[in-house]
Amino acid sequence: MSNELGRLEDLPSDYRDELARRNLVPLWPSLRAVLPPAKPRPATRPTHWPYASLRPLLLRAGELTPIEKAERRVLVLANPGHGLEKMQASPAIYLGMQLLLPGEWAPSHRHTPNAVRMVVEGEGAYTTVDGEKCLMRRGDLILTPTGLWHEHGHDGRAPVVWLDVLDLPLVYYLEASYHVDGPRQNVDEGPGGIATTYGGVVPAAAFERTGSRAGYPVLRYPWERVRAALVALASDRPAQEVLQVAYVNPQTGSDALNILGFYALMLRPGQRLRLPARSPACVFHLIDGAVDVRVDDQRFALEVADTCCAPGYTQIDISNRSSSVPSFLFIADESPLHRKLGVYENRG
C-alpha cells in the first residue's frame, strides 16, 4: 500500500467545515503521525539539567518566595520537546528540584499522582508520610504513594534540596489529577517505624499493616544501604557485568510504585556501558562520581547532582570518566507502565 495518503487540503472546504461542525475528523491525513512506520517519533528530547546552574536559581527562589506563598518551592525540569508549559520531562515523568529552608514546613496534603524524593543536598529535613517520619539524607529515596498524606519539615541549619519524580503527566492526561489539603500529621512512633530498618526479610502476615499504608511496607530507602548492596555486587560479579539494583516492594518483589520504576546503577572505574534501545523514556541523576551519557548523537557530561533524560527507543551509552573511583546513578523510567500496557520493548 502506498505511503502517500490523502491530505486534509485535498478535501473540499465545505466538506471540511461540515465535519468540523459535527465534531468529526478524517483519520487518513493524520494516520502516519499517530501510527508512524517501524518506531515512534518521540517528542521527548535528550535534555541535561546541570545542578551547578540550577542551584543558584533555586536558592534565589527561596529569597523571592516564602514557603507560605509556594506550598512546594520547586523549579520544574521541563523538556523542551514537550513545551515548557507542559512541565514534563517525558510522556509519564515529571521532575522538579525542591528547596526547603531551615525552620520551614511544607504543609500536609495528598494527591493522586505517585511521587518519590531523591535527596540531593543537605541534612535535617524529613518527610512525614501517613504518620511515619522519614529522615532525608543525601541519596535517600522517599516514597509518597498515591493518596497518602505527606508533608516536609526542616529542623537543620542549611538548605535541603531534593529531586521530585512523579507520574503527574500521565495522571493529568487521564484527567485524574487532584490534591486535598490536610492538617499537620501526628508522627507514628509505633511499629510502623520499623519499615525503614529491615532488609532482606519482610513482616510476617500476623503483623502486616492495614489501612492506607497497606501495600507500601517501605517508604524510605537509605542510600548507605543501597550503595553497600552495589559494592557487594561488584565484589562478586565479573568486571564488565552491569551492576544495578531496583527499588522494590519487599513484600511482593514488584516495583516500589506502580507506574514508574526506580533503580541505582554503579559504574566501576573507567567502565563503559551500552544500554539497549528500549521503549520507555528514562531519567539519570548522578549521586556520586563523574559520568558521560550519550543519547544517540548527543553527549552530556554529568557532574554530581546533574540530571538528564533520554526518550524511548534510543541508544544510550554511559561511561565513568574516573579511572580510580566508581560512579553511582539513580535512574527512573516508565518500564512498569509500559509492561502493564503491553507495549514494553527491548530492541537489544
Image (spheres, rainbow, N blue to C red):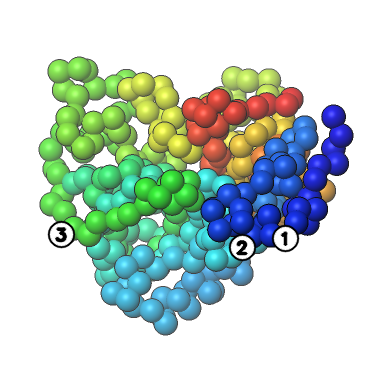
Q: Where does residue 246 sit, x and y in percent of width and height? A: 50, 30
Q: Earlier in the sequence, mark 1 or mark 2?
A: 1
Q: Where does residue 243 sit, x and y in percent of width and height? A: 61, 29
Cβ atoms at labels 1 and 3 below 8 Å apart: no
- Does 60 appear above or below 242? below
Mark 1 to mark 3: distance in Å? Answer: 58 Å
Mark 1 to mark 2: distance in Å? Answer: 31 Å
Which image quarter is the N terminus in? top right
- Secondary structure under tag 2 reads loop
Q: Nearer the viewer, mark 1 or mark 3?
A: 1
Which residue has dot 1 on it?
13
Q: Where does residue 188 sit, x and y in percent of width and height? A: 14, 44
Q: Earlier in the sequence, mark 1 or mark 3?
A: 1
- Secondary structure under tag 3 reads loop
Q: Where does residue 2 sit, x and y in percent of width and height? A: 87, 34
Residue at the spot x=72%, y=33% of the render? 277
- Does 161 appear above or below 66? above
Q: Is residue 341 visible?
A: yes
Which residue has dot 3 on it?
183
Q: Amino acid at mark 3?
A: Pro
- Secondary structure under tag 1 reads helix
- Does 325 appear above or below 244? below
